[in-house]
Image (cartoon, rainbow, N blue to C red):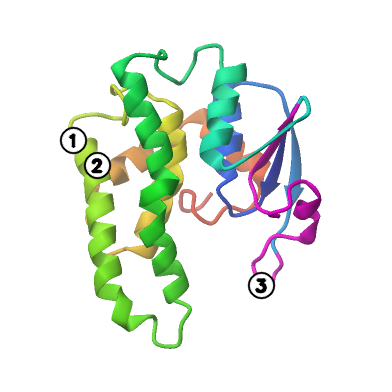
Amino acid sequence: MLTVHHLNNSRSQRILWLLEELELPYELKSYQRNAETNLAPPALEAVHPLGKSPVLTDAGNTVIESGAIIDYILRRHGGGRLMPAAGSNEHEQYLQWLHYAEGSAMLPLMLRMYTGRLPDGGAALQPRINDELNRHLGYMNRALDGVDWFVGNTFSGADVQLSFVAELAPLLHPEGVFPNLAAMRERFQARPAYQRALKKGGKYDFGPAGQ
C-alpha cells in the first residue's frame, strides 16, 4: 500500500494530487506544522531522518524528494500514464522539467521567502533575486507559449511537479507578469483530481482563492 506522509502547506500536496489523478489507492498520514515555528513535527523524523515532507513508503521502500516520488509512482504504479515513453525525445524533456522544478526554479523563490524574514528584507540581495525570478519564471512562461502543458502539450507528472512553483510565484513575486504560467495554474487548479486532493490534504495556503 502506498502511504503518503503529508505535511500541511507543503510540497506534498502535489503528491496527493498525482495519486488522485491516477486514481490509485493510498493511505494518508497527516502531520501539522508547529504553529509558532512553522516547522514540521519531530514525528516525521521517525519516518525519515531529515524529518521533511513528502515521504512515500511502499512495500518496504522509503522515498523522499517530490521529483523522485513522482518518478517512483509513475514507473511502478502509473501503467504508462502521465509520462512519455522511455527513450522518446518527449521523455528527455519530461525528465528535464521534472528535475528543473526543485533543481533551479525553486531556489530564487526560497531566497525571496527567507530574505523576507530579515529585518531589512535582505535589501542588498533583492535585485539579484528579482533578476533570477524573472529569468526562471520568464523561461517557464515562454515554454507555455501556445500550449497548455510543458511536455508535448500533454498533461504529465512534470506539470504536477512544476505546480508548486506556479503557485508560489504570484505570492512571492507579485510584480512579475507571466500570463501563460497564470493560465496554466488556473487550468490545473480546476482539475477534479486537484480539487479532491485539496479536500484530503487539509489547509493549503497556495491553492485557489476561497478554497
Residue 156 screen position, x and y as percent: 42, 25
N-terminal of the two: label 1 or label 2? 1
Left or right of 72 in this view: 141: left
N-terminal of the two: label 1 or label 3? 3
Location of mark 2 (residue): 180
Instruction: Identify whether 149 is placed above or below 38.
Output: above
Left or right of 86 in this view: 182: left
Amino acid type assigned to the residue bearing label 1 in the image: Asp
Foreground: 103 or 190? 103
Residue 199 sits in quarter: top right
Residue at x-position 55% and y-position 35%:
68
Instruction: Identify whether 138 is placed above or below 14.
Output: below
Asked if marks 1 and 2 touch (Cβ < 8 Å), the reply is yes
Residue 118 screen position, x and y as percent: 46, 82
Residue at x-position 22% and y-position 50%:
138
3D distance between C-alphas at marks 2 and 3: 35 Å
Location of mark 3 (residue): 37
Residue at disc 3, secondary structure: loop
**What is the chief secondary structure element of the magenta stretch?**
loop
Instruction: Identify whether 89 is placed above or below 176.
Output: above
Location of mark 1 (residue): 145
Amino acid type assigned to the residue bearing label 2 in the image: Asn
Residue at disc 2, secondary structure: helix
Amino acid type assigned to the residue bearing label 3 in the image: Thr
